[in-house]
Image (tube, grey):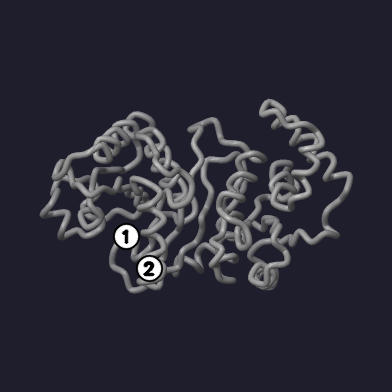
Amino acid sequence: MDTIVKIREKARLKQKTIVFPEYDDRRVAEAAKILEREDIVKPLLLTPDKIDAKEKEKYAQEFYELRKIKGIDLDTARKTLEDPLYYAAMMTRSGKVDGFVAGAAHTTSDVARASLRCLGVDGRLAVACSCFVMVVPDCPYGAHGTFVYADCGFIPEPNSRQLACVAILASELASKILDLSPKVALLSYSTKGSAKGRSVDKIIGALSIIKGMAPEVIVDGELQIDAAIVPEVAQIKYPNSLLGGQANVLIFPDLDAGNISYKLTQRLAKARAVGPLILGLNKPCSDLSRGCSVDDVVDCAAVTAIRAL
């Protein structure tokens, strides 16, 4: 079954409610119609009439309690809740909805701040990051052209521990959303010592941390991209790799590499890019590229629904 079809089918079985604060964006409004018509999720467009004054005050009080340690007062909390992003995030926190999707008309920084401040970082790994599900047509690599790319939107210069946590979170998403057996590659300009540098040292450190934190994860690095996804090249460059050139979860050494790579893949290979999917929080939410299509919104909502408890 096609990856996108499978994602939508899985979401349909969950019947979760996803809120969209950017109700006045044409693409979001059209996506909500598709989601409702095809019974994928229960979409809630956060139009002004859907905002309840008593509920907003309750959320403002709760937000104040969450953030007063950072020096905000109740008036500031109330002003913050005037922003639909924060109202949607607090709806998700409270359990009134199962997740939120935004970013068609906001930057990743805007969505990240709202999600981090309202939903909070899961204490298990204490790292938030993002990933994309990439579906590349007519591609023999990965899982028949399906990959998870991370981190493409959050951490500019991850250290070894952060990189390890990104890899663990991305592998968990690949398993839950795509039903894949994750094969994780820590990408580099070097393959197993072919070059030296601080970036390579960071990746070697991340690999060691992953093996300690999550020994069940099938992971290898540092690997150049061809050694990670092309079996014939892997056999030449590093025949002893656990991955054998069959990686389907690609972990980039920094945000530059991740963001550039997903957009290149999307545009040059005509790939579907589902995300950014925000990982590591207490509740699920997804960012959108401001260049997103209607289908991108639909697919992000579907993945968010699958991730909801």
Q: Position of residue 215 (x, y in %)?
A: 34, 34
Report the quarter where the C terminus lies.
top right
Between residue 176 and residue 192, name the one nearer to us: 192
Q: Count up the numbered dots.
A: 2
Between residue 162 and residue 246, name the one nearer to us: 162
Disc 1 packing (10 Å; few <14; some 14–19; many ≥20): many
Amino acid beneath label 2: Val
Alpha carbon separation for disc pair 2 and 1: 9 Å
At 52% across and 45% down in the image, what residue appears? 279
At 64% across and 71% down in the image, what residue appears? 27
> Splitting the image into 4 quarters, where does residue 134 fall?
bottom left
At 66% across and 67% down in the image, what residue appears? 28
Tag 2–tag 1 contact (CB < 8 Å): yes
Q: Position of residue 242 (x, y in %)?
A: 23, 45
> Splitting the image into 4 quarters, where does residue 206 fall?
top left
Q: Which residue is mark 2?
A: 136
At 78% across and 49% down in the image, what residue appears? 82
Disc nearer the start of the sequence (2/1): 2
Determine whether the residue tagged by mark 2 lies in a helix, strand or loop.
loop
User: Is 293 placed left or right of 272 in the picture?
Assistant: right
Amino acid beneath label 1: Gly
User: Is 144 placed left or right of 120 in the picture?
Assistant: left
User: Is 250 placed left or right of 222 in the picture?
Assistant: right
Where residue 266 is drawn, which disc sits there? none
Q: Which residue is mark 1?
A: 142
Between residue 235 and residue 79, name the one nearer to us: 79
Above or below, comparing residue 138 to residue 258 in the picture: below
The answer to whether any part of residue 10 appears in the image is no
Disc 2 packing (10 Å; few <14; some 14–19; many ≥20): many
